[in-house]
Amino acid sequence: MRRLVPAWVGVALTTGARRVLAAPGGLAVGMAIHVLIVGAVSTLWRVAVEANGGSLDGYDATSVTWYMVLSEAAYMAVSSRIIEDIGDDIAGGAVASEMLRPAPVVGIRLAVQFGASLPRLVANLVAGGAVALVTVGGPPSTGALLLALPALPLAAACNLAAAHAFAGVAFWLRDAGSAWFLYQKLIFIFGGMLLPLQVVPGAMRAIAFGLPFMTMAYVPARLGSGHVEPQLLLVQVAWLVVLTAAATATFTAGERRLQAVGG
């Protein structure tokens, strides 16, 4: 009977996770940075909420703190330099070498990076959750937090797929630096990483809800902040399919170009 999931997927996921776990120092530094960011930004948001009478667009001091815990945990699970790293691999010939394998290049890369994101997700959720428990107490809704748990890996998967699609520009330009700069700004502005999308001005908010970047930070954060909106998980799944297809198409076209020009 044919395997539904190729054997290389499990190997790639395990490889990515082991790479992160083999460097506990790097994991600890990431947790420390996560704690500092969550502590600082959530404090600023609590001040803003209190100045607004205790509620701001549906968020109170507790929910906005847990929002920041989940949004930063999702965002920081993926290396911030991944697009540049992929671009360097394309320009340096590593991708051309990987094309000799029987498994798809983008598939292996996505699986390895997703495996690497999982330990970071757990570590950041534990560290950020501790900050929230100390400062504002438990999450606003246990049910909503349970919905946020699958939303976190889905957010990382969407981020990785989009990053590979953006990084594919290096097949033609031999440099993904500009793509990395643009991508980071798009997540900052439209992804809900540092602020709930509800507080974004009307026109920009409408645009944000129509783009995939909201799946990468806003969705798990919105759920974790106490809003029981399970339909957001379906939005993530739908965008994950689209983004994975885009990444696959970009790499397929790029690999053909490498073959045409001789690597």
Image (cartoon, helix red, strand yellow):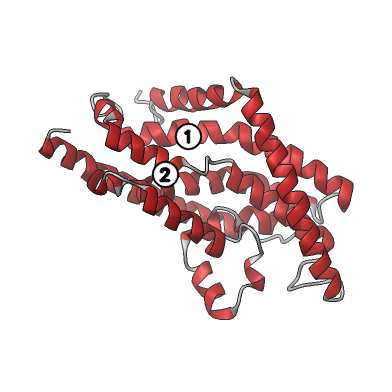
- Residue at point 30%, 37% (across, down): 90
Which label is found at residue 83? 2
| Left or right: 263 as drawn, with respect to 189 | left
**Residue 149, position as x, y percentages in the image:** 66, 44
**Of 96 and 147, which appears nearest the observer?**
96
Q: Secondary structure at mark 2?
A: helix
Residue 158 visible in this rendered orientation of the protein: yes
The kind of residue tagged 1 is Gln
Q: Residues within 10 Å of mark 1 (few under 14, many from 20)?
A: many
The kind of residue tagged 2 is Ile
**Residue 214, position as x, y percentages in the image:** 54, 60
**Residue 212, position as x, y percentages in the image:** 47, 59
- Residue at point 45%, 50% (across, down): 240
| Left or right: 249 as drawn, with respect to 156 | left
Q: Where is residue 262, by image quadrant?
A: top left
Residue 137 visible in this rendered orientation of the protein: no
Q: Where is residue 12, by image quadrant?
A: top left
Location of residue 39 with respect to 85 vertically, above or below: below
Residue reaching furthest bottom?
A: 202
Q: Which residue position is annotated with label 1?
A: 113
**Of 190 and 12, which appears nearest the observer?**
190
Quarter of the image for the C terminus: give it. top left
Location of residue 81 with respect to 44 vertically, above or below: above
Quarter of the image for the N terminus: give it. top left
Location of residue 2 with respect to 48 vertically, above or below: above
